[in-house]
Image (spheres, helix red, strand yellow):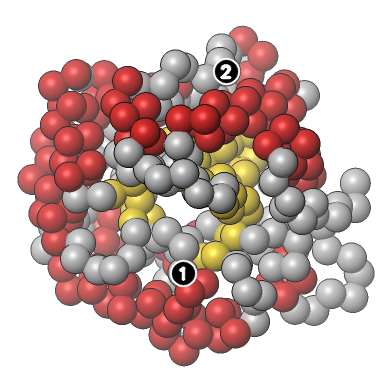
């Protein structure tokens, strides 16, 4: 993911901002249970996951799913996936594995949520063939989709009547820098139980709004291909630990890099240290670096 890439990441203040006061309220409303952490990458193909697959691996998804327990699944953004393909993917992965498919670009970038009810329904119906393997699908809007289109976001939020959790990523700065706009947005998402995605990337610190709208955070972490990425992941583990004390029971955390080098390595580092600090028992992926 090249979104938010900067030339000199060492000049960026990557400190995670304080929790939004309402985020604490969202977590506090949850009943304490076992902590479930879903960690993965955006894709499973060999081209992107360099330094991960041993020679001779033919079924990439089968191998990937024995090392990670989730996949962001960006492949669904550019092409429609048939229900039969979703079902096949589900059959080819172990119990507990989760797919989080991105809604198609026709919905988010071409039609920009204008009269997309039929397309959204097709996506929801098709992806439901993942069965219990379906995690949290998400919608990522175009960078220039702004608050002037609030009515479209409202129609989408109020029209999501499926028994499937969903997350939304809005990128235009105006959604977060105007308190009146952000307040109305957060209220809408919270009311309709839509997760407000957090994106941790160098050039867009405004997207670290730290405002939860459901008790299940969805984090898209974008590394800067820099040694400071380790410290950044350590800080996230600390924040997740504090959220756990507030009532966190479940979280999705997906690892990206501006340049797809050693994505599995950073994910393995995150999982290994998460296990140490929080007592989780996630499988630590094997990497070839």
Farthest residue to the left: give it: 151
Q: Is residue 87 left or right of residue 20?
A: right
Q: Residue at x 60, y 84 (%)?
A: 91
Give the image quarter of residue 182.
top left
- Residue 102 visible in the shown view: no
Q: Residue at x 38, y 35 (%)?
A: 27
Residue 134's label in the rendered image is 1
Q: Is residue 215 left or right of residue 244?
A: left
Tell me: residue 70, above or below residue 199: below
- Residue 37 visible in the shown view: yes
Q: Residue at x 41, y 21 (%)?
A: 19
Give the image quarter of residue 48.
bottom right
Q: Residue 285 placed where, x, y %?
A: 80, 54
Residue 156 or 20: which is nearer the viewer?
A: 20
Tell me: residue 236, above or below residue 123: above
Residue 260's label in the rendered image is none
For label 2, the SS is loop
Tag 1 or tag 2, which sits nearer the N-term? 2
Q: Residue at x 77, y 24 (%)?
A: 227
For label 1, the SS is loop
Q: Is residue 289 left or right of residue 278?
A: right
| Residue depth check, mark 2 versus mark 1: number of the one nearer the observer | 1
Q: CA distance from mark 2 to mark 1?
A: 32 Å
Farthest residue to the bottom: give it: 84
Q: Residue 127 placed where, x, y %?
A: 40, 75
Circle 2 sits on which residue? 14
Q: Residue 83 placed where, x, y %?
A: 41, 85
Q: Is residue 258 left or right of residue 226?
A: left
């Amino acid at each position: 993911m090249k979104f938010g890439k900067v030339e000199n990441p060492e000049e960026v203040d990557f400190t995670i901002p304080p929790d939004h006061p309402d985020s604490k309220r969202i977590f506090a409303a949850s009943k304490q249970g076992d902590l479930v952490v879903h960690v993965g990458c955006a894709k499973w193909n060999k081209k992107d996951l360099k330094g991960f697959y041993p020679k001779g691996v033919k079924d990439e998804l089968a191998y990937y799913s024995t090392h990670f327990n989730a996949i962001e699944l960006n492949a669904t953004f550019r092409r429609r996936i048939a229900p039969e393909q979703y079902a096949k993917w589900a059959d080819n992965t172990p119990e507990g594995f989760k797919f989080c498919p991105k809604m198609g670009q026709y919905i988010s970038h071409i039609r920009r949520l204008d009269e997309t009810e039929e397309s959204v329904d097709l996506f929801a119906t098709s992806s439901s063939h993942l069965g219990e393997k379906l995690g949290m699908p998400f919608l990522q809007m175009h960078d220039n989709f702004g608050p002037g289109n609030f009515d479209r976001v409202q129609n989408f939020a109020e029209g999501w009547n499926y028994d499937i959790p969903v997350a939304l990523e809005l990128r235009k700065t105006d959604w977060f820098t105007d308190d009146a706009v952000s307040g109305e947005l957060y209220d809408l998402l919270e009311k309709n139980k839509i997760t407000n995605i957090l994106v941790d990337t160098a050039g867009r610190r405004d997207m670290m709004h730290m405002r939860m709208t459901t008790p299940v955070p969805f984090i898209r972490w974008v590394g800067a291909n820099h040694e400071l990425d380790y410290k950044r992941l350590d800080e996230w583990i600390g924040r997740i630990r504090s959220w756990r004390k507030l009532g966190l029971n479940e979280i999705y955390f997906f690892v990206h890099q501006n340049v797809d080098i050693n994505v599995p390595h950073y994910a393995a580092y995150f999982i290994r240290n998460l296990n140490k600090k929080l007592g989780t028992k996630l499988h630590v992926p094997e990497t070839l670096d």
